[in-house]
Image (tube, rainbow, N blue to C red):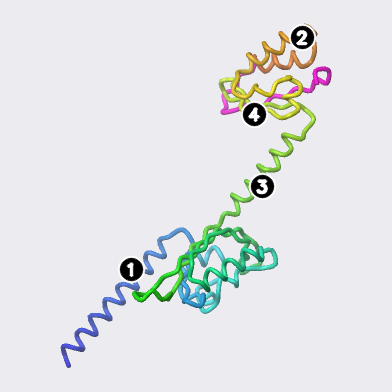
């Protein structure tokens, strides 16, 4: 009886040590982590998850990831997440989620199922990362790219050595070339000057580009000559 009690206490101590180790590990992870049962009900979260969502651990306990979804969450992505949890298969995607105060954030969310020795799903581990800043940057870059192509003035971007990195359609039309990317500005200037003996705004601006040197990684120039279009 004493020996059996000793074994039980030893196992209990081992279990407590494992729990402390788990809590320490989860607390050290910068990404949000949640552990759910086979039905998708949250049983454990780390501090990063609580900070990211604005919900305390006890507020999330027993609830599903659906508590973070709202009117802007894509229905197809929401269904894909539910189906993945129900079928015990991995999931990875980006969803628009909502914090406790109602503010939204883009959540890069992955779910990995956990199985017992018999292959039955027992839990799932969810890892979340706030990618709102990246999504906003991507949207701004896409808008800038569209404006760059659609603007009526000719624009080009060069590196510090004067090599052309990018030109828009208007610039290609003004320069009468679609093969200027990668060339140096003074080569484009020389080719343009050979094509025409006229003194025009385009040539003078190309010459100005050729003389310009930038100490930064890239510089931007433009041309607005309408005679050479």
Q: Which of 169 and 53 is in front in this view?
A: 169
Q: Secondary structure under badge 1?
A: helix
The disc, 4 or 2, on the residue closer to the chain's N-terminal end is 4
Separation of marks 4 and 2 at Cα, in angstroms: 24 Å
Say what secondary structure mark 4 lies in: strand
**Distance from label 2 to label 1 (Cα)?**
76 Å
Instruction: Label 3: state its secondary structure.
Output: helix
Give x and y (percent) for residue 94: 58, 58
Count the numbered circles shown.
Answer: 4
Structural distance between the alpha carbons of marks 4 and 3: 19 Å
The crowding category of the residue bearing disc 3, from other C-alpha atoms within 10 Å (few below 14, some 14 to 19, many at least 20), is: few
In front: label 3 or label 1: 3
User: Badge 3 is on which residue?
Assistant: 139
Magenta residues?
212-229
Q: How crowded is mark 4: few (under 14 residues within 10 Å), some or many (20 or more)?
A: some
Up the image or down, 44 lies above or below 194; here it is below
Rendering coords of residue 156 (x, y %) = 68, 26
């Amino acid at each position: 009886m004493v020996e059996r009690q000793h074994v039980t206490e030893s196992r209990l101590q081992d279990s407590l040590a494992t729990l402390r180790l788990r809590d320490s590990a989860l607390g050290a992870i910068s990404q949000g982590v949640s552990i759910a049962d086979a039905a998708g009900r949250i049983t454990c979260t780390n501090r990063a998850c609580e900070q990211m969502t604005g919900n305390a651990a006890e507020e999330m306990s027993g609830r599903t990831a659906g508590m973070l979804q709202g009117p802007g969450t894509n229905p197809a992505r929401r269904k894909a997440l539910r189906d993945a949890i129900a079928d015990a298969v991995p999931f990875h995607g980006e969803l628009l989620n909502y914090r406790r105060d109602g503010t939204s954030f883009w959540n890069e969310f992955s779910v990995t199922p956990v199985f017992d020795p018999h292959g039955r799903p027992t839990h799932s581990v969810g890892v979340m990362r706030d990618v709102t800043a990246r999504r906003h940057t991507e949207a701004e870059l896409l808008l800038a790219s569209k404006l760059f192509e659609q603007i009526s003035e000719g624009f080009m971007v060069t590196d510090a050595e004067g090599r052309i990195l990018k030109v828009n359609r208007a610039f290609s039309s003004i320069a009468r070339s679609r093969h200027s990317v990668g060339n140096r500005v003074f080569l484009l200037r020389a080719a343009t000057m050979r094509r025409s003996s006229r003194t025009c705004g385009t040539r003078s601006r190309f010459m100005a580009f050729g003389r310009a040197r930038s100490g930064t990684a890239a510089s931007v120039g433009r041309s607005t000559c309408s005679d050479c279009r």
